[in-house]
Amino acid sequence: MWAAVLAGWISALLQAISGYDQHAGRAHAARFRHDLLLVPGRLVRHAGQLLLRLPPGRGDLLTRTLAALRAATPIPAT
């Protein structure tokens, strides 16, 4: 039960961060997975850095979500 609740929370969080829920309400889980999580990509090493290569046109939502996650400030530990 807790795994299902956690998965729902993570899905809602990713939809809120990506702005996916602003267009047509909450997406169904299958559509959201298809648009955000099932994007084929590959990790490549270039100049000592790991890069995520995405196919053209498919990774727009993933790219925006990753940029929003990088820009988020961490909550300081107490």
Image (cartoon, rainbow, N blue to C red):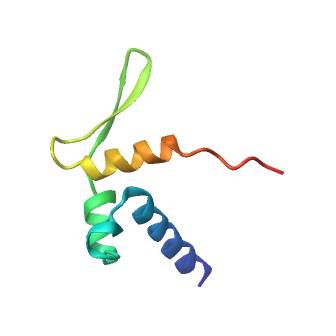
Measuring from the top left, give residue 6's x and y in whole percent.
56, 73
Q: Residue at x 27, y 68 (%)?
A: 23
Q: Position of residue 31 (x, y in %)?
A: 26, 71
Q: Nearer the viewer, residue 54 or 22?
A: 22
| Image quadrant in which the N terminus is located | bottom right
Relative placement, left or right, of 10 versus 45 is right
Q: Against 19, is 77 above or below?
A: above
Residue most extreme to the left: 57
Residue 2 is left or right of residue 30, and the answer is: right
Is 10 or 69 nearer to us in this picture? 69
Count all numbered tags in the image, as a single digit: 0
Residue farthest to the bottom?
1
Which residue: 49% across, 41% down?
70
Q: Name the side, left or right, on which 78 lies relative to 42.
A: right
Question: Which percent across, then down, holds residue 26?
Answer: 35, 76
Location of residue 33 by image quarter: bottom left
User: As drawn, which residue projects farthest toward the right?
Assistant: 78
What is the residue that sits farthest to the front in this orientation? 22
In the rendered image, the vertical position of residue 51 relative to residue 17, given as above or below? above
Residue 52 x/y as whole percent: 34, 36
Residue at position x 31%, y 74% from top?
27
Please tell me whether residue 65 is drawn above or below residue 31 in the rendered image: above
Identity of the residue drawn at 29% across and 74% down: 30
